C-alpha cells in the first residue's frame, strides 16, 4: 500500500502527443493495480496516486490508449514510477508509438535473458511480444537470389516505429524536392548546353563543394589520386594484395618489361590488384533508345615505399576464348588513352561501389539484422537493447531505395549504365559471394592483405573502430549478461535470432561463413560486433565519400555512352563522348549530392539518447564506449590536420548510429 508517483515522457516532436486518455496498470510481484485513466499524454507528464495494494517489486507497467472519437497515436519514450518500497524510481523504457486501443506491456528496464528470470515472471510477456512482432515485422521479397527485405513497398506499409519521424521526414522530403526542382529548372539547359571539353563538366560542379571535391576536380587525372581512391576513397572494399599474377592478365608479346616489373613487385609483396570481374557479362542499360556500356576491368598497382599506390597496367575486359588478348593500357601510353582507361575503371568502380559495397553490404545487410532482431528478440533481451539504437530509419530508407533508386523507372534505370536489370544481376552476383569474414574488418583486411598498410587510413580506422565497438561496448555488455559459454548456448532466443538471420534473412548464408548457432561468448561478441559495425562504420565508410569523390562526374561516371576503347588512338572528344551527357551527369549529381550531403537530422555513433538498459553497469559500459569514441575522434582530427588528403569517413562523430540515408 502506498503512494506511487508516476512520470510519463512523451516524444519531443510536435506530433508525439495524443489527446486520448491513457489507462495505466502497475504490475508487481505480489499483484496488479489498475490506476485508471489518468493520463492525457499531450499534457499529462506526472501524477501521484494512492494504491491500496502491496505490489512488492514492480515488474511491469501496462498501458492502454482509449479513443472515444478520434484515435491519435502517442509516442511514449518512457514511464517511471517511484513507489513506497526500497526499489527507488523504477524505469520502464518504451520509445515506441502507442497505437489503437490494445494493451501494451512495458517491462522494467533491467535486461534479462530467459535464464535471468527463473520464476518466469516475464516468460509469457516475452512470448506474447514476439508473437505480435512476427505479425508486424514480416520478411518481404524484392528480387530472387537476394537477401530479404522487410515486407512493404512504401513507408505507410512499414510498422509505425520504423517510419521517419517528422523531423527526418521533413528534411528528407524538402531537400529532395528542392534538389529535383533545381534539377528540373537547370536541367532544361542540359539539352541545349553540351559538353565539348572535359572542363565543361564544371557547368554542373556544385556550389559549396567540399575541399576534397575541389582536389578531385583539380587532380582527377593524376595516377597517385587514382590509386589513392582504392585505399581511402568512396569504395575502399575492392583492393587486395596480389598473391600471384591474375590468370586473366594475359600479357601479349612485347610486354616483357611489364611482366618483369609486375613480378618484381609481386616478389616484394607490393603488388596490388582491383578486379571488376563481377561486372563481366552484365547487360548494359539502354537510356532513351541509346545503348550504354559496361566493362569488367582489372587494375594492377604497386605500393610505393612512401605509401602511394600507383597503377601499372589496366586491362579493360577479361580475355575471350578464341580472341586476341585484350589491349593493355599503361601509364606510358598517350595521355588521352591512359586517361580513358582510368575513366573506365572509375565508372566500373561506381557500379560496384554503389551496388555491392554501399547498398548490399551497408543498407541491405543492416536491414536483415534489424528485421531478424525484431522478429526474434524480446525488448527485455540484452542483445535487443544493445542493437535497437542501430536500426533507426534503416527499413524506411531502404524501402525508399527500392521504390525510387533501383526500382523499375528509378534512378538506376534513368542514368546508370547497369540500370534496367543489370543492377539486379550485380546484386545477385554480389550476394552469392558475400562472406561473413568480409563484413568483419580484422578478417576482411587480413584476407585482402591490407593489415599494416600505413597508407590504408580506411583500414587503420576500421580496425580501431571495430576494436572499440568490440572490446569496450559489446564485450562489456555481453560480459554483464553471459557468465559462461554455456549460457550463450542455452539462450534459445539468441540461438533463434542467429538462425533467423543466417538461414532466413541472409538466405542460407551458412555456406559463406555466417553462423547458424552461437557456441561461445567470443563468437557471440564477434557476431554482434559485425552487426553494429555493419549498421554504422561499414555503411558510413561507403556512404560518406560520394560527395567528395563523385561531385566531379568524370571521376565517378554513372554511365559510359561508348564502348571501351580497342585502340590507343584516343582524343579528348572520345572521352567526352564516352562520359555521361550533361543531363545524365546532372541527374547523377543531384542524387549523389542529395544522398551524400551531411545529414542535419543525425545521431552519431553511440550518442543515442534512449535508455534501453536500466542499472548502473550497462550505463557504465556505454559511458566508457563514448569516452573511447571521443578519444578516437580527437586522434583522427589531429592525424588529419597534417595530411594532404584527410580521411574522415570513420571518424566517430561522422559515423551515424544507424543506416538512415
Ligand atoms: C546513384 C546513387 C546510388 C546509390 C545506391 C546506394 C545506396 C542506396 C542509398 C539510399 C537511397 C535511398 C533513397 C533514395 C531516394 C531518392 C533518390 C533520389 C532521387 C529519386 C528521384 C525521384 O524518385 O524522383 O544510400 O544512400
Ligand atoms: Fe547510404
Image: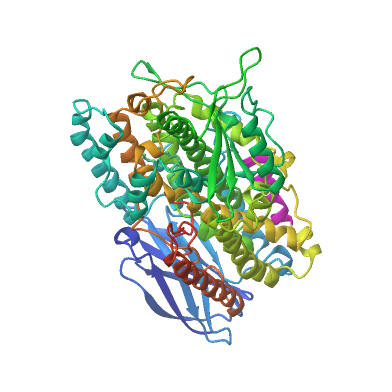
Question: Which residue reaches farthest top?
Answer: 322
Question: Which residue reaches farthest right?
Answer: 486
Q: Is residue 220 above or below residue 495?
A: above
Check if residue 493 falls in the magenta segment: yes
Residue placed most toward the observer, 572 or 319: 572
| Spot occupied by residue 480 in the image (x, y as percentages of width and height) | 68, 72
**Residue drawn at the location 53% of the way across and 86% of the way down:** 84
Q: Would residue 117 be visible to someone looking at this image? A: no
Residue placed most toward the observer, 522 or 302: 302
Residue 356 figure quarter: top right
Residue placed most toward the observer, 204 or 16: 204
| Spot occupied by residue 519 in the image (x, y as percentages of width and height) | 79, 56
Q: Is residue 229 above or below residue 63?
A: above
**Residue drawn at the location 26% of the way across and 52% of the way down:** 208
| Spot occupied by residue 433 in the image (x, y as percentages of width and height) | 65, 36
| Spot occupied by residue 326 in the image (x, y as percentages of width and height) | 58, 21
Give the quarter of the figure containing the N terminus. bottom right
Q: Is residue 638 above or below residue 275?
A: below
Q: Is residue 391 above or below residue 294?
A: below
- Region rendered in magenta: 492-506
Amino acid at each position: 500500500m502506498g503512494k506511487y508517483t508516476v512520470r510519463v515522457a512523451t516524444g519531443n516532436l510536435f506530433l508525439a502527443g495524443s489527446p486520448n486518455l491513457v489507462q495505466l496498470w502497475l504490475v508487481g510481484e505480489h499483484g496488479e493495480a489498475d490506476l485508471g485513466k489518468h493520463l492525457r499524454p499531450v499534457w499529462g507528464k506526472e501524477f501521484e496516486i494512492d494504491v491500496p495494494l502491496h505490489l512488492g517489486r514492480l515488474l511491469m507497467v501496462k498501458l492502454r490508449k482509449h479513443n472515444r472519437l478520434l484515435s491519435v497515436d502517442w509516442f511514449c519514450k518512457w514511464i517511471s514510477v517511484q513507489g513506497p518500497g526500497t526499489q527507488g524510481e523504477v524505469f520502464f523504457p518504451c520509445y515506441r508509438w502507442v497505437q489503437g486501443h490494445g494493451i501494451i506491456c512495458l517491462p522494467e528496464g533491467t535486461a534479462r535473458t530467459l535464464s535471468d528470470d527463473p520464476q518466469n515472471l516475464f516468460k509469457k510477456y516475452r512470448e506474447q511480444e514476439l508473437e505480435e512482432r512476427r505479425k508486424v515485422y514480416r520478411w518481404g521479397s524484392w528480387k530472387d537470389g537476394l537477401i530479404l527485405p522487410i515486407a512493404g513497398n512504401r513507408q505507410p506499409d512499414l510498422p509505425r516505429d520504423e517510419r521517419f519521424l517528422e523531423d527526418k521526414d521533413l528534411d528528407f522530403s524538402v531537400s529532395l524536392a528542392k534538389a529535383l526542382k533545381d534539377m528540373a529548372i537547370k536541367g532544361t539547359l542540359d539539352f541545349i548546353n553540351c559538353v565539348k571539353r572535359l572542363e565543361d563538366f564544371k557547368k554542373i560542379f556544385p556550389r559549396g563543394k567540399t575541399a576534397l571535391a575541389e582536389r578531385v576536380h583539380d587532380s582527377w587525372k593524376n595516377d597517385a589520386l587514382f590509386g589513392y581512391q582504392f585505399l581511402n576513397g568512396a569504395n575502399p572494399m575492392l583492393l587486395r594484395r596480389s598473391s600471384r599474377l591474375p590468370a586473366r592478365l594475359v600479357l601479349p608479346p612485347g610486354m616483357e618489361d611489364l611482366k618483369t616489373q609486375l613480378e618484381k613487385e609481386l616478389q616484394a609483396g607490393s603488388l596490388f590488384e582491383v578486379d571488376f570481374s563481377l561486372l563481366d557479362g552484365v547487360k548494359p542499360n539502354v537510356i532513351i533508345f541509346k545503348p550504354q556500356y559496361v566493362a569488367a576491368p582489372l587494375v594492377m598497382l604497386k605500393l610505393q615505399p612512401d605509401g602511394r599506390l600507383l597503377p601499372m597496367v589496366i586491362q579493360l575486359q577479361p580475355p575471350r576464348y578464341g580472341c586476341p588478348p585484350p589491349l593493355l593500357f599503361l601509364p606510358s601510353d598517350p595521355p588521352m588513352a591512359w586517361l580513358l582507361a582510368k575513366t573506365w575503371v572509375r565508372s566500373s568502380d561506381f557500379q560496384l561501389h554503389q551496388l555491392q559495397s554501399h547498398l548490399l553490404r551497408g543498407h541491405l545487410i543492416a536491414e536483415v539484422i534489424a528485421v531478424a532482431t525484431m522478429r526474434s528478440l524480446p525488448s527485455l533481451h540484452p542483445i535487443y537493447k544493445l542493437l535497437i539504437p542501430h536500426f533507426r530509419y534503416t527499413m524506411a530508407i531502404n524501402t525508399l531505395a527500392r521504390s525510387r533508386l533501383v526500382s523499375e523507372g528509378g534512378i538506376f534505370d534513368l542514368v546508370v549504365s547497369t540500370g534496367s536489370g543489370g543492377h539486379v544481376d550485380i546484386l545477385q552476383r554480389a550476394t552469392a559471394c558475400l562472406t561473413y569474414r568480409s563484413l568483419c574488418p580484422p578478417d576482411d583486411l587480413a584476407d585482402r592483405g591490407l593489415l599494416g598498410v600505413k597508407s590504408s587510413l580506411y583500414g587503420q580506422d576500421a580496425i580501431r573502430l571495430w576494436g572499440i565497438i568490440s572490446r569496450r561496448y559489446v564485450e562489456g555488455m555481453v560480459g554483464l549478461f553471459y557468465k559462461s559459454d554455456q549460457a550463450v548456448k542455452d539462450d534459445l532466443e539468441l540461438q533463434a535470432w542467429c538462425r533467423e538471420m543466417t538461414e532466413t534473412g541472409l538466405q542460407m548464408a551458412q555456406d559463406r561463413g555466417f553462423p547458424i548457432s552461437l557456441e561461445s561468448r567470443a563468437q557471440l561478441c564477434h557476431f554482434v560486433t559485425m552487426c553494429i559495425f555493419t549498421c554504422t562504420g561499414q555503411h558510413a565508410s561507403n556512404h560518406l565519400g560520394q560527395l567528395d569523390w563523385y561531385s566531379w562526374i568524370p571521376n565517378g561516371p554513372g554511365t559510359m555512352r561508348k564502348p571501351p576503347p580497342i585502340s590507343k588512338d584516343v582524343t579528348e572528344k572520345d572521352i567526352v563522348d564516352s562520359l555521361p551527357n550533361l543531363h545524365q551527369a546532372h541527374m547523377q549529381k543531384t542524387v549523389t549530392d542529395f544522398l551524400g550531403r551531411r545529414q542535419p537530422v543525425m545521431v552519431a555513433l553511440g550518442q543515442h539518447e534512449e535508455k534501453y538498459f536500466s542499472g548502473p553497469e550497462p550505463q557504465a559500459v556505454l559511458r566508457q564506449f563514448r569516452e573511447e569514441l571521443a578519444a578516437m575522434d580527437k586522434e583522427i582530427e589531429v592525424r588529419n590536420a597534417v595530411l594532404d588528403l584527410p580521411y574522415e569517413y570513420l571518424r566517430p562523430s561522422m559515423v551515424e548510429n544507424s543506416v538512415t540515408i
